[in-house]
Amino acid sequence: MATIRDVAKRAGVSVATVSRALNDKGYVHEDTRKLIHDAIQQLNYRPNEVARSLYNKKSRLIGLLLPDIRNPFFPELARGVEDEIQAHDFRLMIGNADEKPEKESEYVHTFKQNHVTGIISATSNKDISFYDELSFPVVFLDRTTDQHPSVYADGVDGGKMAVRELVRRGSKRITLLRGPVELKTAQDRFKGAIDEICTLNVEFNVMNTSSFAFEDAEESARELFERYPDTDGIIASNDIVAAAILHEALRTGKGIPEDLQIIGFDDIPLSKLLYPSLSTIRQPAYEMGREAAGLLIKMIQGKAVEQKNIKLPVTFIERQTTRKDGNNG
Amino acid sequence: MATIRDVAKRAGVSVATVSRALNDKGYVHEDTRKLIHDAIQQLNYRPNEVARSLYNKKSRLIGLLLPDIRNPFFPELARGVEDEIQAHDFRLMIGNADEKPEKESEYVHTFKQNHVTGIISATSNKDISFYDELSFPVVFLDRTTDQHPSVYADGVDGGKMAVRELVRRGSKRITLLRGPVELKTAQDRFKGAIDEICTLNVEFNVMNTSSFAFEDAEESARELFERYPDTDGIIASNDIVAAAILHEALRTGKGIPEDLQIIGFDDIPLSKLLYPSLSTIRQPAYEMGREAAGLLIKMIQGKAVEQKNIKLPVTFIERQTTRKDGNNG
DNA sequence: TCTAATTGTGGAACCGTTTACACATAAAAC
DNA sequence: GTTTTATGTGTAAACGGTTCCACAATTAGA
């Protein structure tokens, strides 16, 4: 690997001049610039980012921390982050915390030790003390915090929306899946739903589900139909859980959506491919990723950010697990 | 952030001694060791990995390059890699190439510039010249190469297996989805299937599908039933495509599996949640990830590796898109 | 007891960059 | 024709670690 010294020698100048030319800082004569440029070409020189970041104490790396790379919602977020970041010539480093605080802490350390310029954290851990003494900006994604900048979807409204759509389409006994209690986003949806359900004065049950993961989803689904066999509208805590419920409903011979309506949350790519395809409250995952990245980059560049907590709207995606409006059961 | 100099000052020794104590190299008196340890505790010192890797020209980072983070097969691979790597005290840095050679090349550069000790590449790009002049080991995952170490599943056998299972269960007119031509893994499955189908002398059609992505899958599905309405067994190029086909089949009122059997490939988590749940040829994604990471780590540690191209077996996962054996249509 | 080997420590060079500063030259101002 | 000012370049000190080597002190070997 060629170093800046090799380039300097080849071009017949000092390393300082090469560095200046490289970074467009200070004066460099046009002719020397050309000389240096040629030398760089010939040697196929690329500056050593490690040396750079040792001196600068920052790199062009941004760390993205995901809670669970297997939940399709997060790769979608990641894609948004990635696109925005790359447009600004930063590089992305993804870490998967696997819902474990130790792993999260380790990744934050790795990021810090590798001199990232900023972190976007989408983990669901309550304890955010890891992020306290960092010398670079942090944006929380898919999560609300007062202390830190954040980007999230309007879960409360999402919950309300789900209830409204279900009730409007004729559901009379709604079952609400609560989702992980430690997860603020899940609880927002839940609270929104409860709120609306009380306003509309509809009969309802609540079922506590432990997690968002594929494995637990099946178990929850089975339990749900045992406990509340006469429910005619289910609001799932996310699309994975909804898929499991749909599966179980079909297995036990329920008519979807005639006997039972189901609404999910997220709108992951698979929801469309289910049969019947899943009606859901869409979180704009890709856009959320882009927003978070945009916010972080502004902070990195020292620009004033007008709005530190960005709430994005959710939308109802009507598919086939809900009835047509007006066709009330 | 405390530096090694702060620690040295606090402990009343030189930086060289601290470094020796830190890395367990050379002589350090037990008493001094204790002194240093205390100083580290008090200052909450963590060595700067950037400085370390500048001198050592390598870090404890391993780069993982995925072709498409949105395809659920790859996060599963990543989890395997992650677990194995963390067990050996390395850290993972994930990059998403998005099926684009430019992005792949950029990530390889980023990895190189950040002094990773090794790369695991699961991209599907034919041109692997980016990897040629690297000073650290590279393992290819989910791909066969002669020039580089690799870990992959037995796609040829998978293709054969799919045909056998379908025929054994009574399919007479099989449609084969070919999958992306530039993708060796897809073509292996395809070739295996063709081979077996010829051996068994069964009637068949081939449909070319352009990609593995969600968006294209629906389009392909629609086209398939227009072109080959009387097919009674479909071998999809992966589970996503299979899901789309299943969706379309149900939509058009086909009986699954009575009229039409479907077999996917991969066994991604969602396959179980489809209804009817998807029969598929399972690739042991998690294990593949672990194997690749294990192989890479051995190479990093300079250990002799007995087998540079590891082929893992695939298995048929019987679910509900195929009939029970013996119940031949 | 003297020499040799072992143990413990510190100074300084090095990894590949950036940048403060000194210096030289050329152009502009008076 | 001096004095400023602008332009162009190089030297050397950082950044935060690791390691080579020299040296001192202790222990072992004879």
Image (cartoon, coloured by chain):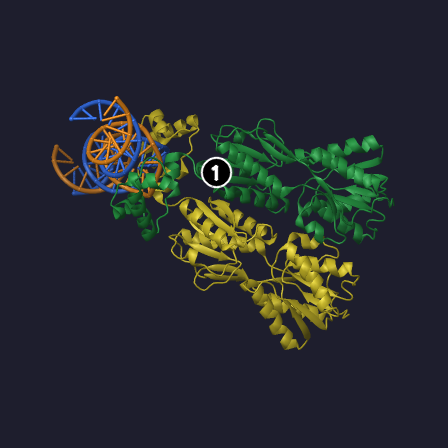
Chain colours: A green, B yellow, C orange, D blue
**Label 1 residue SS:** helix
Q: Residue at point 81% right, 45% down?
A: A261
Specify the quadrant of the image occupied by residue B313: bottom right
Q: Quadrant of the C terminus of chain A?
A: top right
B116 on left or right of A124:
left
Closer to the camera in the image, B39 or A303: A303
Horizontally, is B126 left or right of B7 in the view?
right
Q: Is residue A74 above or below residue B151?
A: above
- Displayed quadrant of residue A126: top right
Q: What residue type is disc 1 on?
A: Phe
In front: A173, or A291? A291
Residue hosting label 1: A111
Q: State the image coordinates of residue B195 (x, y, percent, origin top left).
A: 60, 73
**Image position, residue A321 (x, y; %):** 78, 48
Q: Kindly identify which chain the residue marked by label 1 belongs to.
A: A
Using residue A28 as the reference point, say whether residue B124 is left or right of it.
Answer: right
Residue A89: % across, % down: 47, 42
**Rendered residue at 85%/49% (across/down):** A258
How many labels were placed on the picture? 1
Counting from the top left corner in percent of width and height, residue A14 is at 26, 41
Q: Inspect this view and state whether residue B89 appears.
A: yes
| Badge 1 density bin: few <14, some 14–19, many ≥20, Cα 10 Å | many
Residue at left offset 75%, top offset 55% = B275
- Between B24 and B117, the residue placed more toward the observer is B117
Residue B14 appears in view: no
